[in-house]
Image: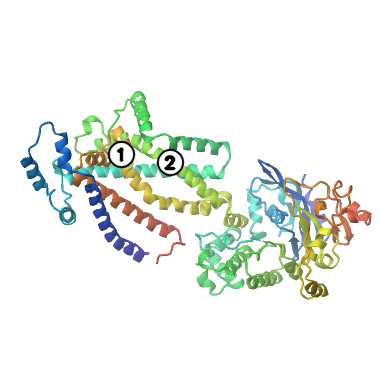
Amino acid sequence: MIWYILRRIVYLVPTLLVVSIIAFVVIQLPPGDFLASLISKAEETIDQAQVDALRERYGLDEPIHVQYWKWISGIITRGDFGDSFEWNRPVSDLIWERLTLTMVISLLTLAFVWILSIPIGIYSAVKKYTIGDYLVTVIGFIGLAVPNFLLALVLMYIAFRYFGQSVGGLFSPEYIEAEWSLERVLDLLSHLWLPVVILGTAGTAALIRVMRANLLDELSKLYVDAARARGLSELRLLFKYPVRVALNPLVSALAWVFPALVSGSAITSIVLNLQTTGPLLYRSLQSQDMYLAGSLILLVSILTIIGTLVSDILLAWIDPRIQLQ
Amino acid sequence: MLPTRTKLDQQLTADERLLDVKDVKTHFFTDEGVVKAVDGVSLSLKRGQTLCVVGESGCGKSVAARSILRIVPPPGRIVSGAIQFRQRDGHVIDLTAMNPRGRDIRRIRGGEISMIFQEPMSSLSPVHTVGSQIMEAILLHLPVTKREARKRAVSLLDMVGIPRPGELIDAYSFELSGGMRQRAMIAIALACEPQLLIADEPTTALDVTTQANILDLIRDLQRESGMAVLFITHDLGVVAEIADDVVVMYLGRDVESGTVDAIFHDPKHPYTRALLQSIPRYDSRDSRSAAHDKRRLYSIKGTVPHPFDRPTGCPFHPRCEDFIAGTCDSIDPQRFSASRDHSVRCLLYAETDEDGRAKDSSS
């Protein structure tokens, strides 16, 4: 097992290298560069000498592999992700707090999704074709069908109208720029439920369906009958055998659920005005702020790879059928 | 509904019966209609005896077996009949009166009556070791510690002929061959020395050599432990080899039952006769001439009717070669006794034995 994990970690290195190259190439693909989009947006004309000076300063006229090398060597040796053109600040200053908040929201959402969907999915499968099952299914489909941003707007309205909460963002106005303190954490928590519920709804609905389908498959397997035939009680039987097997696909789904939460929440985050990475990435892509965009894409990719690794290790741990060779 | 215990005791002690299934009906209530999977089956089993239930696929053999353990999957349900079982302490209980999820039936399952299934490939959990499943059965029914249960599990694996039992107790099912898995299933089934083993086509999914090994194993274990075996199969060769008594089923009911000699040498029911005729033989005079004539192997005409489309009268009449128009398609035959311990549900025998009709009426 330890060798398996070590080997998987070693494999990460070339994967990350390739991912970083792709991330860098992708952000270079659109025509023009940050200066071009800056010039196009600028009110007054910028003379060519000024543009050339900027271009040289940012190294934009160098060949792409030289630019890439500057960027990646800075990350590896100094943890320096380069400067954001638009914000005129180091990328690392901009992203760490946002990345932390994104992680917190994602992990909470993931917990919310699992805690809610697994028991409901089990109930729905065990009581299939009963009123309870139909009810859960209908609610689940509504949750799947309603776009997150719409749900965000509705819940924001409810939170504001009936609970008098300041809506939008993750902090009340007085805490936005404040230092970290107990009060600030509590304020954060009181704001967190909204994005967690909104981001988790669709995932919960989807996972209820997945759990229900998985479990229904397992419930009709002969090993369930065999366990029943040796005298196990229904409840112990349910959790020891079919539920245990039905959870495996959920663990492997972890790999794609996680990055989707990190990057896929951009629109909701914009609607809710969350200080997460989604809106930042969206803006940086619009303005071709290449070091910022590239770094964000790289970090999301790294999260994806780590998510895959974690789910693979978990799966190897809980499912003996997976060969470690 | 439930007869008093003394009455039951008297009924059963007469011939040391272990299990008495009386006219059990198990129906499945689906949206499309009621499927009468088991529609009046009676059978009885003495201690240490082997009873074979034979019949085509879909005739209700498996559902009948599952009805005994009360593990019929929904929407199936026992709608009438009684299943009397003599517990180890001598008390006779009616299994149909029990709550299928209750503690009482769970004590019977695995403790007094065990079951092994058709597909050893899928009857073991894919994510638990063989040993943990044997130990589970032991710990559920016997007052032993985990360590003792493990020791017992190893000796059970040894008993069913699994090599290196001390090692393979920690193997997962996917690490074992089909034959080994069925041996492991038998070890689980025998873990608490049941009085009755229900074997639902335990050799169907195995190759012929392994089949023979598993049959030998079951027979040896039965001889040592004195348990009774209810063996479900469609293989008449297996029946001839292991059965004491035979019940032939067709469309959810027993059409003929008797000793293995009576069924093979003096079959009464047209269905039983047709079944026996459709066995390919290479040792008899018939087949030698058959080889010469290039005659086709006999097969029963028609197919098993759709469950929603049960024939009226005798369910076998559309395929029967001795069909009597106006009689067989309107009168549902009772059980008539052809001789002692040999009963047949066919109107051909209606007049021949008035006594049997009176003694052994079915509905």
Would you say residue B360 is visible in this rendering? Answer: yes
Residue that badge 1 annotates: A266
Q: Does residue B127 appear to the left or right of A6 in the view shown?
A: right
| Residue depicted at 18% across the width and 49% down the height | A81
Tell me the quadrant of the picture where the N terminus of chain B can be found: top right
* Mark 2 surroundings within 10 Å by alpha-carbon count, few (fewer than 14), some (14 through 19), many (20 or more): many
Q: Does residue B223 appear to the left or right of A118 in the view shown?
A: right
| Sooner in the amino-acid sequence: mark 2 or mark 1 | 2
Q: Chain of mark 2?
A: A
Would you say residue B91 is visible in this rendering? Answer: no
Residue found at the very far top of the displayed protein: A161
Query: Which percent across, then down, holds residue A244?
Result: 49, 53
Numbered disc total:
2
In the rendered image, the vertical position of residue B169 relative to residue A145, given as above or below: below
Which residue is nearer to you in this view: B326 or A227?
A: B326
| Residue depicted at 45% across the width and 44% down the height | A207
Going by the numbered disc 1, the residue's amino acid type is Ala
| Residue depicted at 74% across the width and 56% down the height | B85
| Residue depicted at 13% across the width and 41% down the height | A88
Query: Which percent across, then down, holds residue A140?
Result: 47, 38
Q: Chain of mark 1?
A: A
Residue that badge 2 annotates: A204
In the rendered image, the vertical position of residue B129 relative to residue A159, given as above or below: below
Which residue is nearer to you in this view: B315 or A179?
A: B315
Rendering quarter of residue B322: bottom right
Query: Which percent across, then down, holds residue A217?
Result: 54, 51
Q: Does residue A74 appear to the left or right of B242 in the view shown?
A: left
Rendering quarter of residue B65: bottom right
User: Quick check: do tags 2 and 1 share a chain?
Assistant: yes
Going by the numbered disc 2, the residue's amino acid type is Thr
Distance from disc 2 to disc 1, alpha carbons, whole Å, reads: 19 Å
Q: Secondary structure at mark 1?
A: helix
